[in-house]
Image (cartoon, rainbow, N blue to C red):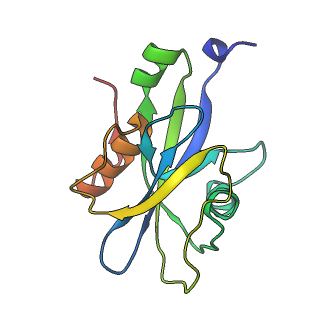
Amino acid sequence: MSNIDHVVVGVGVIITNPQGQILMGKRSSQHAPYWSIFGGHVDAGESFEDCAIREIKEEIGIDISAPTVFGISNNVNTYRQEGKHTVSICMHVEYRGDKQPQIMEQDKCESLMWVSPHELPEPHFEASRNAIDLWLNHQFYHHPA
């Protein structure tokens, strides 16, 4: 089955620090050189929360707890550009841990940084931009234009 034949469900996790900054990663393989929040595809039988916890641990080596769903985004621009249609479950967690996030998958991410949600690095990945826009504007659903 090609990517055009199905829709992929993923989670995108906005991780904030006590200063209100968002943790971003610069992609180094697929979707390079885009900046993005962290997350990934939901495995069959997996809850959104479990997916977020697993993906964050795999990607940046930190433990998060109780991520909350705040929105959903239908990412059709990526579909129009690449033929891959994703729907993102947008989640948020505030990280107050002592362990600093670090790149665990060098083949997928080349750098990390905390940024103001109002000053996003460019170029920026569609699903990430949609999630941050929903979060900032207290909206639940991002529909395609």
| Image point (65%, 17%), residue name | 3
Q: Is residue 41 above or below residue 81?
A: below
| Image point (46%, 52%), residue name | 37
- Residue 56 visible in the current orientation: yes
- Residue 134 position in % (x across, y down): 31, 49
- Residue 73 position in % (x across, y down): 42, 38
Horizontal side of 27 relative to 142 (left or right) equals: right
Q: Quadrant of the C terminus?
A: top left
Tell which of 15 and 137 is nearer to you.
15
Horizontal side of 64 relative to 123 (left or right) equals: right
Horizontal side of 107 relative to 67 (left or right) equals: right
- Label tally: 0
Q: Is residue 109 above or below residue 112?
A: above
Horizontal side of 124 relative to 7 (left or right) equals: left
Tell which of 46 and 24 is nearer to you.
24
| Image point (58%, 32%), residue name | 30
- Tell me which corner region of the image, top left, top right, bottom left or bottom right, holds residue 49: bottom right
- Residue 75 position in % (x across, y down): 44, 30
- Tell me which corner region of the image, top left, top right, bottom left or bottom right, holds residue 62: bottom right
**In the image, farthest residue toward the bottom:** 98
Q: Quadrant of the N terminus?
A: top right
| Image point (52%, 32%), residue name | 31
- Residue 13 visible in the current orientation: no
Tell which of 11 and 27 is nearer to you.
27
- Residue 35 position in % (x across, y down): 42, 45
